Image (cartoon, rainbow, N blue to C red):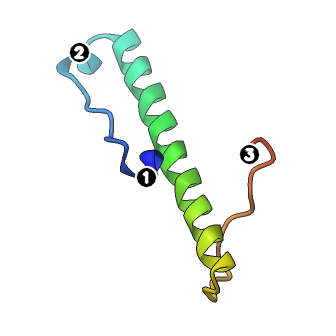
């Protein structure tokens, strides 16, 4: 559940002028969005196990326990 409620990384003014800060922000935002997507997939699959008639849940990634 922590992944679902994780706060989105906030950009700083540094990303406008510092390529390294921009790259760091982009990487942290990508990591955050992947975490949200995976958490959504886990919730979707859980709802299916509980009887929800969803046919759109993503498959469990091979590297996810």
Q: Which of marks 1 and 2 is in front?
A: 1
Q: Where is residue 27 in the image (x, y as percent from the top left)?
A: 48, 26
SS at circle 2: helix
The reply, left or right, for residue 64 in relation to residue 26 is right
Which percent across, then down, holds residue 60?
74, 57
Where on the picture, by quarter, is residue 18? Answer: top left
Q: Which of marks 1 and 2 is nearer the N terminus?
A: 1
- Which mark is in front, 1 or 3? 3
Judge left or right: residue 64 versus residue 33: right
Nearer to us in this view, 46 or 15: 46
Separation of marks 1 and 3 at Cα, in angstroms: 17 Å
Tell which circle, 1 or 3, labels the residue nearer the N-terminal end. 1
Could you say whether the residue bearing mark 3 is in a helix, strand or loop? loop
Residue 48 x %, y %? 65, 78
Judging by the rendered image, the residue that carries numbered circle 1 is 4
Nearer mark to the viewer, of 3 and 2: 3
Q: For the point 59% across and 76% down, which residue is it?
A: 47
Give the residue pinned by disc 3.
65
User: Alpha-carbon neighbours of circle 2 within 10 Å: few (<14), some, or many (≥20)?
Assistant: few
Judged from the image, the secondary structure of the residue bearing numbered disc 1 is helix
- Snapshot quadrant of residue 20: top left
**Residue at (32, 33) in percent of width and height:** 9
What residue is at 42 percent from the left and 35 percent from the top? 29
Q: Which mark is residue 14?
A: 2
Residue 43 left/right relative to 59? left
């Amino acid at each position: 559940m922590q992944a679902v409620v994780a706060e989105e990384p906030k950009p700083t003014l540094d990303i406008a002028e510092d390529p390294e800060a921009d790259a760091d922000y982009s990487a942290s935002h990508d990591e955050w969005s992947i975490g949200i997507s995976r958490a959504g997939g886990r919730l979707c699959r859980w709802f299916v196990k509980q009887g929800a008639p969803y046919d759109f849940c993503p498959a469990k990634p091979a590297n996810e326990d």
